[in-house]
Image (cartoon, rainbow, N blue to C red):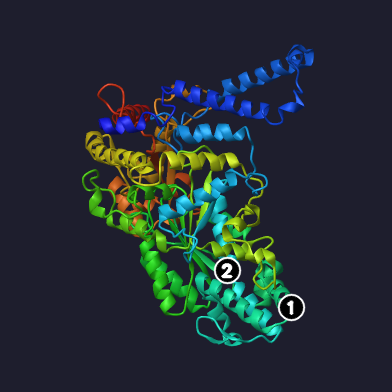
Amino acid sequence: MPTQSDLSFVRPLFLGPAAENDELFESLVVEFLRDHTFWRRNFHPEDGQRIGADAKNDPDFLDFQARTRRELYQLSAELKRAVPFFHPRYVGHMSSDLLLPGLVAKILTTLYNPNNVSEEAAPQTLEKELQVGEQLARMFGYETDDDASPCAWGHLTSGGTIANYEALWNFRSVKFYPLALQAGAKEISFNPHAGPKAKPFHDYSKWELLNLSMQETIALRRELAGLIHDEADPAVLRAFRNAVKAERIESLGTAGFFLKHHVTPPVVLVSASAHYSWEKGMKVLGFGTQNLVKVEVDDHMRMDLEDLDRKLDAAFSRKVPVLAVVGMLGTTEFGTIDPIHGIVAARDRAREAGRDFGIHVDGAWGGYLTTVFRRPDGSFMDRSDFSDEFTYFPSETVHAAFRAIADTDSITVDPHKLGYIPYAAGAFIARDREVVDFIAQQAAYVFDLGDREHHIPRREQLHRLGQYILEGSKPGAAAAAVHVTHNVLPLHSDGLGRLVRLTLRSCERFWDSAQIMAERLAGRVTLIVPFEPDSNLICLALNPAGNRDLARMNAFSREIFARMKVDPTQPVQAKTFIGSYTSLEKGNLPSGQADRILHDLGIDPVTFVAAPEALDRDAAHIFILRHTLMNPWLLDGPGERSYIDLYWEYLEDVIDEVLERDTP
């Protein structure tokens, strides 16, 4: 059960499973609604009112009011069939109750409707968005001091998918810039000694230029800009600028650039359990899904570092540029954490051999778990610091992975997941804010002689946010929601980390009780946790006792899940618990892991057949129940039982019901 300290901490944070904090929520909304109306009334009060008191008696006014109420009542009635994410009986997808500070801040700011595309449209909330980027960057261990190099920056997106696209966009622009720079230099016969090897710039091979690090490319650009400003007249500068621009991938297009510069399209390496947005991103950027290389996962569903080395060596040996390796910081399917420290080590080894690639961390789900590791003073906690509160968390791999984040290039994180913020609020964070010069729609171009914009301070430059992001118009209300929440619950172990730790304890309790339940159900079903949880997401696999056929097991598990699935034709109260599911696809599982899971379930491996060979769809994957344990009340519950206890009682009843129904 949660401690009294836990309960005291969490009670004021949310509206609550039974709307226990309705008076607090209502008072906050009404207070700031009144404050907003006062602001409107006092903006040039000398203008008077445009809507007179008698207007409210007009037939048109009354008709509009009636129609609006009717539609809103209809909407409200329909929403009663919405998914009850707020309740601890919901253990499905990555959604839960919303933190009151962010919820009220979003409602309040929506009344002002700021557009965070630029400072002119959102003078207050755009600055808050940039501050949120800095808060998240510091949480991950990036430097944010203006005098630091590199200095991080970040901004909000509509979600993790767009943030992942942006990572690829950044890597693409920087990766291929040196080739355009060399082509422009050759066109005007500009050949200074420059770059990391301090040799004539024309002498760098294409492969050398494709394997400069991000920081080396940024430094090279600055170095050449300084040299040509010292040596050339304005006409030569303009010619150089135009030549470089014409040779860039942004001008030629992806296919045109590769053809003109005789470059093999790059590959991006991700773990086999990566989110599907990475395939979409390869399509959007024009790289093609065949260049998304899936790295095998190990027995814990984490990226297999040995297979990563093999696939990196295969690409480099064929002189194929490696754009990036993407590590998952909490997969959306299984919650597992890739060994980020191992990816960083692989990049260090590659650099020693004259090879390079970017590292992006997809922390859409697990990014906020970093708050558990970060002390209020910014230092990183040792693994031993967790022993008093946790039995299993964090494993050595998980702890090392989070410590290594500071050495990566960029990160995706979703405040609307473990930040408990209303949709839509994703975020993209980059370790070096100078990458914006490579992607800006109207760049502060360093080769423009006397260009005033080049002298605009960095902070002010970023206020033109729309120039540096994939999105255009974007709600300032999302930035306000995240900013207020981060200030109320700072991003460290004594702030938001206290809430996240509670969810991790729920997962440990669930895992321990799964072992007990497996013994209790023995003889009826075989129940296993296919792989140990790395975060607060845990999966179960179920097989009727004595069954050896995978298709039958999956059909049985689907029957179990059908009783936990939201049915839009029924009131949500008809469901005792609501869950979710996922599948282990044969093509994404190493044979050794598949054999282990099937053995533990008592399934004959012969019945696990890869599509399209499988005649039965249920023979091509392993169906598993997925539980996202982010609700803060799971360790609490009615009476002496927690909601986790209630879940196991419910699951046992459902299992018995399905077994009885399926018995001949």
Tell me the quarter of the image containing the C terminus: top left
Residue 392 in percent (x, y) is at 25, 48
Give the residue drawn at x 40%, y 66%: 344
Q: Amino acid at mark 2?
A: Val
Q: Amino acid at mark 1?
A: Pro
Look at the image and tell me whether residue 141 can be seen: yes
Q: Nearer the viewer, residue 48 or 102?
A: 48
SS for callout 2: helix
Give the number of the mark in front: 2 or 1.
1
Question: N-terminal of the two: label 2 or label 1?
Answer: 2
Residue 633 in percent (x, y) is at 35, 31
Give the residue drawn at x 56%, y 32%: 107
Look at the image and tell me whether residue 569 can be seen: no
The mark found on residue 234 in the picture is 1
Q: Nearer the viewer, residue 393 or 444?
A: 444
Give the residue drawn at x 37%, y 38%: 629
On screen, residue 51 versus residue 343, left or right, reads right
Tell me the quarter of the image containing the N terminus: top left
Tell me the distance, in whole angstroms, between the alpha carbons under discs 2 and 1.
26 Å
Circles 2 and 1, Cβ within 8 Å, touching? The answer is no
Return the residue found at the far right. Answer: 59
The mark found on residue 174 in the picture is 2
Residue 526 in percent (x, y) is at 28, 40
* Residue 117 versus residue 39 in the image, above or below: below
- State which quadrant residue 184 falls in: bottom right
Q: Nearer the viewer, residue 654 or 476?
A: 476
Residue 149 in percent (x, y) is at 48, 66
The mark found on residue 373 in the picture is none
Neighbour tally class for label 1: few under 14, some 14-19, many 20 plus, Cα within 10 Å? some
SS for callout 1: helix
* Residue 353 versus residue 36 in the image, above or below: below
Give the residue drawn at x 50%, y 84%: 197
